[in-house]
Image: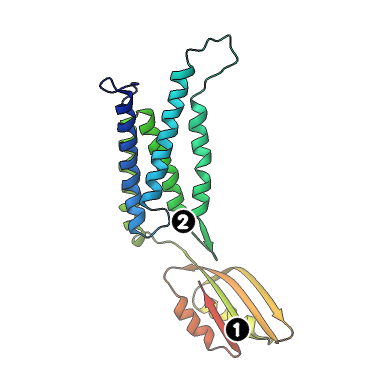
């Protein structure tokens, strides 16, 4: 833990150490995201960590510069305000990497890692080196090693199926029969009828699948009479 204003008599050296450690921690987390092809990679995480660290140092500088002002003035110093705004402001980056594709939401882990990296930068900027180091290790463990549990943990998968076919009376019932025979459940269903082309468009979100069944389901639906288009995600 290092809460001193200087290191070896140099305030600039103390700042440099904080920034370098923040950049290193952000780079380690970003490297894992980079390897997985995520939009917020090494550079983004380094920038977030260094930026948060810089803002914490500025917050500290406010107190060092204006803390001697007497209580009879209107100036009020609260270093915690800068830290609070970092936590709030990092949200716009997190929102930028979250993408919704049908029933699937991607980017939550990357958004959470950016939020956590901001915390690393704040810890190093505060001089709380032990907290920053321990947090860095735990974050990397959660990103690298816990992903290996995905193949062990049994979890539901979601699949969005869109079908376009000739408008006929029994198409919907036959489609639902195919879904039922494959052991799936329709969580959300919507349909649209084209009276000009005499077509019907059916879209549904399917659950309870323990494995990827997109191709198998598509092949079964293809056998139904009047099917023109099949799309699944």
Nearer the observer, 189 or 141: 141
* Percent coordinates x, y for residue 145 in the rendering: 30, 52
Q: Extreme left residue here?
A: 8
Hey, which quadrant is residue 58 in on the image? top left
Disc 2 from disc 1: Cα separation: 36 Å
What secondary structure is found at the residue carrying circle 1? Answer: helix
Image-based side of 103 in relation to 155, left or right: right
As helix, strand or loop, the secondary structure at mark 2 comes to loop
Q: Is residue 146 visible?
A: no
Q: Is residue 179 left or right of residue 125?
A: right
Q: For residue 131, what is the image quadrant?
A: top left
Residue at figure coordinates x 66%, y 85% from the top left: 170
> Which residue is disc 2 drawn over?
107
Q: Is residue 71 above or below residue 159?
A: above
At a point 49% along the width and 49% down the height, the residue shown is 94
Residue 174, numbered label: 1
């Amino acid at each position: 833990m290092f809460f001193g204003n200087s290191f070896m008599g140099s305030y600039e050296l103390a700042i440099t150490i904080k920034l370098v450690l923040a950049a290193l921690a952000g780079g380690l987390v970003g490297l894992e995201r980079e390897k997985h092809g995520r939009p917020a990679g090494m550079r983004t995480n380094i920038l977030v960590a260094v930026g948060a660290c810089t803002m914490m140092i500025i917050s500290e500088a406010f107190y060092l510069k204006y803390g001697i002002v007497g209580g009879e003035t209107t100036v009020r110093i609260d270093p915690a305000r800068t830290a609070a705004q970092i936590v709030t402001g990092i949200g716009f980056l997190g929102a930028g990497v979250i993408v919704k594709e049908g029933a699937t939401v991607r980017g939550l882990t990357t958004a959470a890692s950016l939020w956590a990296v901001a915390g690393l930068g704040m810890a190093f900027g505060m001089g709380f080196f032990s907290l920053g180091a321990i947090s860095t290790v735990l974050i990397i463990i959660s990103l690298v090693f816990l992903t290996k549990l995905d193949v062990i943990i049994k979890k539901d998968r979601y699949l969005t199926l869109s079908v376009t076919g000739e408008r006929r009376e029994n198409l919907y019932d036959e489609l639902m029969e195919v879904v039922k025979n494959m052991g799936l459940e329709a969580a959300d269903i919507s349909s649209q009828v084209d009276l000009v082309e005499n077509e019907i468009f059916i879209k549904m979100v399917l659950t309870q699948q323990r494995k990827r069944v997109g191709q198998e389901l598509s092949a079964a639906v293809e056998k139904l009479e009047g099917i023109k288009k099949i799309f699944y995600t």
